[in-house]
Image (spheres, rainbow, N blue to C red):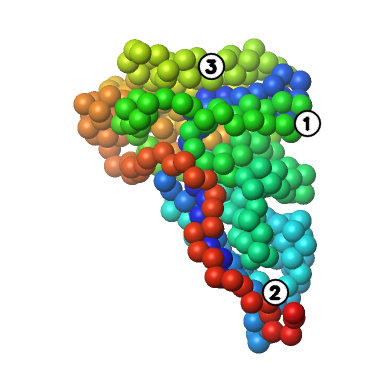
Amino acid sequence: MIISRTPFRVSFFGGGTDYPVWFREHGGAVLATTINKYCYISCRYLPPFFSHKSRVVWSQIELVQEREEIQHPVVREALGVLGVTEGIELHHQGDLPARTGLGSSSAFTVGVLNALHGLRGVMAGKERLAREAILIEQERLKEHVGCQDQVIAAYGGFNRVDFWGEGQFRTSPIMITWERLNALQDHLMLFFTGLSRTASDIAAEQVSVSPQKARELRVMHQMVDEAINILKSPHGLGDFGKLLDEGWQLKRSLTGRISTPYIDELYERARRGGCTGGKLIGAGGGGFLLLFAPPESQAGVAAALGGLLQVPFRFESIGSHVIFYERPDLPVGQS
């Protein structure tokens, strides 16, 4: 039995510049962190005593004879990419719901790959996990997704990630004091809007308008540098919140599907309650609202948002890793 644990992420700046159609020519960068909310994948070889060869448990329960019959696209393609032909049993559990903007889809992909590698006795490196996840999502499944989620889920931590050329990337940890890091975390609030969406549908429209939104995307790229400068400055963190607001206003101008009247109303209520900036996490359309507010103003923000569920969180720094490893036996009849 192998169990992998892969973190979800919060992206602050640069989202939209991590799509290959953009960064091949212009370069891209994001500022993001993984958080202590996780996707868990357990995996083992399935003994050949059942009427089915493999069992895959997610929001559905699949009992299949052949890999090609598996309905979950990521599981099906991960088995193909890694050349797994044995029967397996795979279970998924998550701390937060899917399709809510926290990179859960890529966390799932990275977590499945990590568990399958472990099942075969391989400790896969972070770069390998990220690149294989990008291969599956972008090339095998033809999804309209960027590259940040796979890299961030695999590596973990609070990082700047740069993208360029034909899929090259570099992660750079944000080096600030523990006091500064804790102060940043103490200013952040996360609320669930109650809406979920399919990110690739919204992202497809964003990708299609990238040539017409070059100015906005360049500014969003520059905001990564501005945010890091704020974090490393000796001054207060107030400007970080203001920059989040500027970035959100810029992002929501990219297409008409990123925000909705309901989300705009929530954001304005939060602003009146005392937050100085924020954004909708992920591609847009729903999911989680990240807000920046001084600790003394946070009760007012929560009250302004009524009954919205607030999710406490902290940053994490490990990334995807195997938390349980019991040397797997090959299925009966194999050696």
56 up-or-down from 189: above or below: below
Horizontal and vertical percent position of residue 65: 73, 76
Horizontal and vertical percent position of residue 134: 70, 43
Image quadrant in which you'd find residue 163: top right
**Image quarter of the N terminus:** bottom right
**Image quarter of the C terminus:** bottom right
Horizontal and vertical percent position of residue 121: 66, 64
Amino acid beneath label 3: Asp
| C-alpha separation, residue under disc 3 versus residue under disc 1 | 23 Å
Name the residue that disc number 3 marks. 225
Amino acid beneath label 1: Glu
Horizontal and vertical percent position of residue 213: 66, 17
Compare marks 3 and 1 and give the one earlier in the sequence. 1
Residue at 63%, 18% (x, y): give it: 217
Name the residue that disc number 1 marks. 166
For residue 91, say whether it is visible: no
Mark 1 surroundings: few (<14), some (14-19) or many (≥20) residues within 10 A: few
Left or right of residue 179: residue 285: right
Name the residue that disc number 2 marks. 87
Residue at 43%, 53% (x, y): give it: 95
Amino acid beneath label 2: Gly
Mark 3 surroundings: few (<14), some (14-19) or many (≥20) residues within 10 A: some
Contact (Cβ within 8 Å) of mark 3 with mark 1: no
Compare marks 2 and 1 and give the one earlier in the sequence. 2
Q: Secondary structure at mark 1?
A: loop
Left or right of residue 214: residue 322: left
Of 245 and 193, which appears nearest the observer? 245
